[in-house]
Amino acid sequence: MRKKWRLTAEMIEFAPDARGVYALWKGDEIIYFGRVEGEAQTLRSRLLEHLQPGARRCLNEATHYSWEISRQPAVRESELLSDFWLARGCFPRCNEDETVERVVKQMQADR
C-alpha cells in the first residue's frame, strides 16, 4: 500500500465500493490499519466514517489514506500488522490495542 491519497471527502469519492483493507497515514507514517468486511460497508463508506465528528482521537491525526481490495480482509489486515511488527517491533500507534497473539490467532483462524 504505497500509493496514498489525501484524506478528504473529495478524494475518498475515488475509493472503491468494495471490501478490503486500508491504511491511515499521518504524513509519511502509517498510524492505523483497518479492514472492511461484509456487505454493509465498503472501503469508501468506512473511510468517510473516519471524517465524521466523534472518530477515535488518534485517527483524527490522519492526513492520507491508502487501500487494497481483498477477498479475505481479516487475513490481509493480520498480514499487514504482522509485517509492520516484524519491521518495527511495534504496531501502528492507533492499533496499539492490537497484540501479537491476536494477530497470530486471526491469521490461523482465517486460513
Image (cartoon, grey):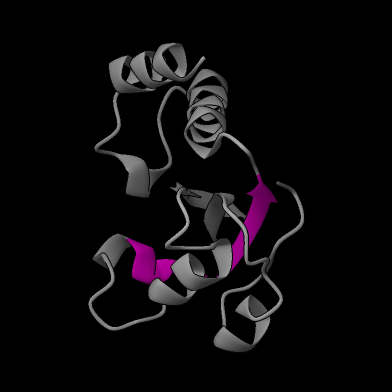
Q: Which residues are magenta?
A: 59-69
Closer to the camera, 92 or 9? 9
Among the 4 quarters of the image, the one containing residue 17: bottom right
Residue sitting nearer the eye, 29 or 107: 107
In the image: residue 7, left or right of residue 40 = right
- In this rendering, the count of numbered labels is 0
Q: Give the farthest residue toward the right.
A: 3
Vertical arrangement, residue 101 with respect to residue 17, above or below: above
What residue is shown at x 55% (from left), y 52% (from top)?
23
Q: In percent of the image, x 45 and y 63: which residue is there? A: 41
Confirm whether residue 27 shows in the render.
no
Between 107 and 61, the residue placed more toward the observer is 107
Quadrant in the rendering for residue 79: top right
Q: Is residue 78 above or below residue 51?
A: above
Q: Position of residue 61 (x, y in %)?
A: 40, 69
In the displayed orientation, state which residue is furthest to the front: 39
**Does 97 appear in magenta?**
no
Residue 71 at x, y percent in the picture: 62, 38
Residue 53 makes an appearance in the image: yes
Name the residue located 53 percent from the left edge and 63 percent from the top edge: 42
Residue 78 locus on image (x, y percent): 48, 28
Return the x and y of residue 34 as percentages of the image width and height: 45, 48
Where 66 falls versus 37 (above or below)?
below
Residue at the extreme bottom: 10
